[in-house]
Amino acid sequence: MTPSSRCIALVGLSGGGKSTVARLLAARLGWPLHDTDALVEQRTGRRIAEIFAIEGEDAFRDRESAALAAALAEPPAVVATGGGIVLRMANRALLANKALVVWLDAPTEELLARLRAHDEERPLLSGDDPAARLEALRAARAPLYHSLAHLVIDTTGRSPDTIVEMILSAARE
């Protein structure tokens, strides 16, 4: 793959480091950065949690799909995706055709610790047992992430800069 001919898309569960790594990677490459959740929020003027509460998950997923299509429309770019981007077949096809897909993963306990360190509301992790919910999301989504990923990185104990270097090395191959 010629890196400049495609986008680099980061996928994975919430707390995996997609937004942080995407910012650093885009800066290193001098490429535009697109975050699908941020694009949805900008277009609607609402937080993701509000969209879920008012319009429901299906409406959010429609908006997320439109944001992904826009983000991948003009390569090269770095795209940080929402954790559920892989749930729709059309999104998986877009990612497979237009991007080098990198799955940023970490054990559930690590993801929860990172999520608790931020104030951001995560609608799909609300409830009495976020660890069980995150495990259920992992069980449903991991096969989809795996089927798309050109590169899988366990982010545990790795700095964002190290992860960026790993992605750049893989993109050069």
Image (cartoon, rainbow, N blue to C red):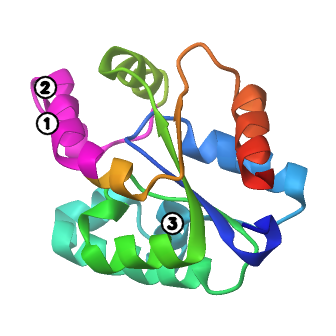
Give the percent coordinates (x, y) of residue 120: 43, 39
Q: Is residue 146 above or below residue 40?
A: above
Regarding residue 165, the answer to whether it shows in the image is yes
**Circle 3: is it few (<14), some (14-19), or many (20+) Cα within 10 Å?**
many
Q: Would you identify the image quadrant in which residue 56 lies?
A: bottom left
Marker disc for residue 36: 3
Residue lying at 47% horizontally and 62% vertically, measured from the top left: 37
Residue wearing tag 1: 136
Amino acid of disc 1: Ala
Tell me the SS state at disc 2.
helix
Do tag 2 and tag 1 residues touch (Cβ < 8 Å)?
Answer: yes
Regarding residue 56, the answer to whether it shows in the image is no
Q: Would you identify the image quadrant in which residue 31 lies?
A: bottom right
Q: Mark 1 or 3, which is nearer the eye?
A: 1
Amino acid of disc 3: Thr
First of labels 1, 3 by sequence position = 3
Marker disc for residue 132: 2
Q: Which residues are magenta?
A: 119-143
Residues at marks 2 and 1, CA–CA distance in whole angstroms: 6 Å
Residue lying at 47% horizontally and 71% vertically, measured from the top left: 96
